[in-house]
Every structure is written in structure tokens, then in C-alpha cells.
Image: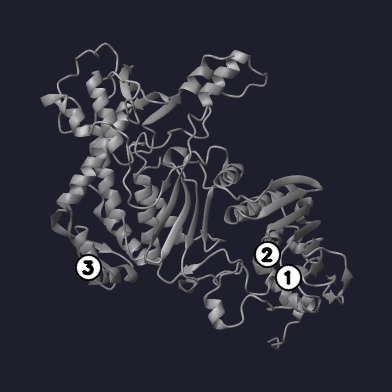
Amino acid sequence: MPRIRQLPQELVNQIAAGEVIERPASVVKELVENSLDAGATRVEIDIEDGGSRLIRVRDDGGGIAADELLLAVSPHATSKIASLDDLERVRTLGFRGEALPSIASVSRFALTSKPEDADAAARIDIEAGQVSKPRPAQHPSGTTIEVRDLFHNVPARRKFLRAERTEFGHIDELVKSLALARPQIEFRVTNNGKPSRLMRPAQSEAALAARLAEILGDDFPAQSLRVDHTGAGLRLSGWVGLPTASRSQADQQYFYVNGRLVRDKVVTHAVRQAYADVLYHGRHPAYVLFLELDPAIVDVNVHPAKSEVRFRESRLVHDFLYRTLHEALAQTRAGSVTSVIAGTSPIPIEANPPSSFDAAMQAAQVANYAPVAAPVWRGQAGLSLGVREPRVDYLALLGDRVGKSGIVENAANEAPAGGVGLPMSADADVPPLGYALAQLAGIYVLAENAQGLILVDMHAAHERITYEKLKTAQASDGIRAQLLLVPLALAVSAREAAVVEDHADELAALGFEIVRSGPQSVTIKRYPGLLEGADVGALVRDVLADFAAHGATRRMQEAHNDMLSTMACHGSVRAHRRLTVPEMNALLREMEATERSGQCNHGRPTWVQLSIADLDRMFLRGR
């Protein structure tokens, strides 16, 4: 049996580097976070060979005194915390004091720094565990750290590095995430001596929108909803992408806790549930969100790379995130924000450049229709639709032909009244979706509003309207439980069986009567009547798993909504049904008054806007 021995410090640092330094981007992360903690307003990052040859980070922060340089590269030496109380209320990005010695142990390392009140700068070099004495150097106020030949002394780690372009891509993505969190900071990045990225400080809303557009794409500011909500000691702010601007990958999801980018299953689950009712299957939302809370109720010391956190009140955080985003997305009524399917291009790019006419047609078809400033959602405030006459008065014009669904009944065979909408005077307040003009192919409603032309998928729109009405009716009537003639025995884990006892009241409120019948078994006696024909056993297992993991569940709500969605789909006006102009106008007014009417139950858009400028481009007007 080998004897227990104390490991040499150099080996200790390399073990720590194995936890913290995964690739060159990890080095950049630690160094830039140190710069931000030092109060830098400008950070310059120079990269060569994807970071394997050189990583240089220069800042204009507070600097390090010459007599503290050796201490700065010692293990567990830091200026950011001094006691357990400080550790429990960490506000800085770094706090362990492991980064610099860990990086120095696997590279050729140089540190040059000058505090603003110092007469001269000082520099130290570290190679193969040997630390030079501080010596004078020329350097402005701030700090520069050079990391050369990363993993040169750990060949096993170096061979796992990817291609230069891949490694630089990780660095660039990291810089973008830091730039989103600190818009007031200037970031400059060079790659192999060539400028790669320059992000100037965003001191205004316009500059902030420009930074968002640079990082997330030109469409994001216009195709997102601004969120700013406070409650229960928490504040959530930032931007959430509209459901119609979803993505095929979860590559534009940035969530920050007290300014720190994190990946957390509680957060991911809450966001996914908030979008569940409006997102197309297999799509992912884009968002940049900032959660601010008391540092004492979140533990950031749970992962070596500080990329994960643990919330003391995880259920409170989950419910706050879900309700805030759910209610914000509910305000995406048709007409309240611009509708566009982002990232789609129906025309393939050809090898030969198209003619001027073809180019104009292509630009018109893939244009982002009428970009507008992203609205700010601040909680429960109502949404002004700007309609001159109330909807009920408008529908009263239709008399007894209006059914409960809001669509004119017994008029399927009526011809459109001349194919024109209601007369509009120059000073009239035009509704957001305007007034109907005609119906196209029995599928689309064409309408005119103040901006130009509106196209509505009438089945998708009415499906959402019917769905929301069914949900409201179901919520007001409550959940009716159905007695099973033969109770269903179900084998579960011991933890899930305990959930049945601990959450009996919550399960009863969901329409279940479940009793524990053994250490790893339960018996289902009642279930929600709306779910007749569903796999009750599988649903109960999912519900119990949610309670065990999150202390709550929305499985029942989601199952109910799936049933209601199916009912709404079959109960909505079908394609190829001819509508009169009054019927089409009634549908438009219903859309304006219905939550989430910008998307159907399956996440597809219900309407799009073509502005007058778009139409002019399409027909080459003004050229």
C-alpha cells in the first residue's frame, strides 16, 4: 500500500488547472473576469493560434501593487473575500484565488501591472514553477497578463485542443456573453494580429440595441420583448425573443445571476414551461435575461468554473421566472408587436448574382417586415390597443349573427361586401390589425392598417382564440375528478411514493386521488375527467417526478392544454370557408383582444405585416 504523502505545490496547481482550465477560452474567462472585478472600463484581448500560442489580456483597472505581485500568483490568495460571511455574499465574478497560479502552472506566464497611484509598473514571469522577482516595467495604469504556450508542459491536455478556428470560436462566444452582461465596458479582440471584434461602451438605448444586434443578429432587438419585473425580493430584466423568432438550436440563450452567466436546470425548466404554450415543436427561444437577488440566497461556490449556482429557495425562483415570462409572453397579442418568421429564406442563394429585378423580389420576400422598437413589459400593466370603438360595440353592428365564438354564423355562403373594409377617415384611430379587405384562397384574410398590408391565417388565428377561451372556461369551472371503477396500482420509486404522502393536497387539487399502498407502490383511485383515454399511469409518474425534482408540477396543466388544443383545432373555422368582410373584421378584433394570438396553439405565426416600404421595394417604386 503506497504511503500517504503531501503533494508538491506545482502538482497541486496543475490538478486545480485541470478543474478550471479546460481550454483557451477558460483562460480568457478567468482573466477577463479578474479585469472586470478590478473595475476596468476597457478590456483588450489578443489571441494567436486559437489561444494555444498566446493569450494576452490588457485592462485599465485598478492594478496590483508591486509588493503584492508574488502574492497574487500564490494559491488561494485574493482581495475579493476575507471571511465566511464574504463567501456567503459574493458579488464579484471571481473569489477563490486559484485562477492565476493554475494558469501559470500550465503555461509560460507573465504579469505586468501598475496601480493608478504608483510611480512605475512592475512585472513578474513564471515558467516551470519558477517565479521571478518583481522588476520595473513600462505600463500604463492597469494590468496585462500574457499566457504563452498553453499546456506546453502537459502534452496529454494539449492534444485534446481542437482546431484553431474552433478554439477561437469558443473565445469569441465567451467575449460576447461577457459583453452582454457588461454593456458599459469596451471590448477589443484581435486574432493573429488582425482586429476581430470591437464593442464600444453602450451608454444609450440605441447603443445597447446596437450591441444586442451585433451579438445576437440584426433581427433580435425588433423581434424581442423587453422584460423588467420585480417581486418577492427578485428582479428579472432583459429581453425574450418572440415565439415566431425561435431558433432550431439553443445557441442564443444567456441567463445571468447577479451578472454571472450560469447554466441552471431550474432556470431552463422555468423558461421552457413559460414558452410551452406558444413555441413550435422542436424550436428554442432566444433570450438575454438578468436575475438580481440577494447574494445570500444563492450559492455560487458549487462548480470549479463557477458556471452553476444553487438557489436556497429554488421553487420561489422557478415560480417567479415562470410567471414573469409567462405573463410577458401572454401580451404578444396580434398587432401589439411586429410578426415575422426570423431566419427563414424561401429563395435559395444562387452562384450567379441575380438581376436587379430578381434581387428586389428576393429582398422583399425575405425582408424583416417593419422593424419596431422592442416594447418593455413591466408586470401587470394593461395593453392599449388604440381602437376607437370598443370591441363589444363593434360586434353589436353584426346583430344576432354573432355566435359565441365571435365569428358570424350562418354566413358561410355570403359574398364579400364588395371586397372593401370599413371606411376610414384621415384622423380615425386605426386598429392594430386594421380593417379587412378581402379573403385569399379561402385561407388568408387581407387587411389594411396604418403601416400597410396585414395577412392573417384565419384558421390558425381562430384556433388560438378558441383555445384561450377554452382555457379560461376550464380554469373557472375547476378540475372535475373521475372515479376509476378499478383502482390502478402503480410501481414507483420510494422517493416518488413519499411524494404522494407529502403532496396529497396538491395532487387532489389537480384532480387526483392517490394513496401509498407500499414502500414502492401507489394506487390511483381518481383522475381528471378531461384526460379520459390518456395514459394515466405514465402521467402520474411524470407528475410525481416533477414534484420530487422541483416541488411543483405543470404536467397536469400541460396535459389539459393538449386536450383543449385538440378541441380548439377541431372547433375552429376551417380553411376554404368563405367569410364576409364583417366576419373577417370580427376575427381581427378578437385577435387584438386575445392573449398570445400572435401564434397558434402549435407555435406557428397567425399574421404578418407588409409595410408600404416593403411593397414599394417589391414593385421597385422610387427607383
Residue at numbered disc 2: 30
Residue 461: percent from left, percent from top: 31, 32
Residue 388: percent from left, percent from top: 27, 31
Identify the coloring: one colour
Front one among 417 and 149: 417
Residue 393: percent from left, percent from top: 18, 31
State left or right for residue 442 relative to residue 145.
Answer: left
Q: Are marks 2 and 1 in contact (CB under 8 Å)?
A: yes
The amino acid marked with disc number 1 is Leu
Image quadrant for the N terminus?
A: bottom right
Residue pictured at 65% horizontal, 67% vertical? 37
Cα–Cα span, label 3 and label 1 = 52 Å
State left or right for residue 66 relative to residue 534.
Answer: right
Q: Earlier in the sequence, mark 3 or mark 1?
A: 1
The amino acid marked with disc number 3 is Ala
Residue pictured at 54% horizontal, 60% vertical? 262
Q: Earlier in the sequence, mark 2 or mark 1?
A: 2
Residue at numbered disc 1: 100
Image quadrant for the C terminus?
A: top right
Residue at numbered disc 3: 504
Rate crowding at label 1 as few (under 14), some (14 to 19) or many (20 or more) other CA atoms within 10 Å: many
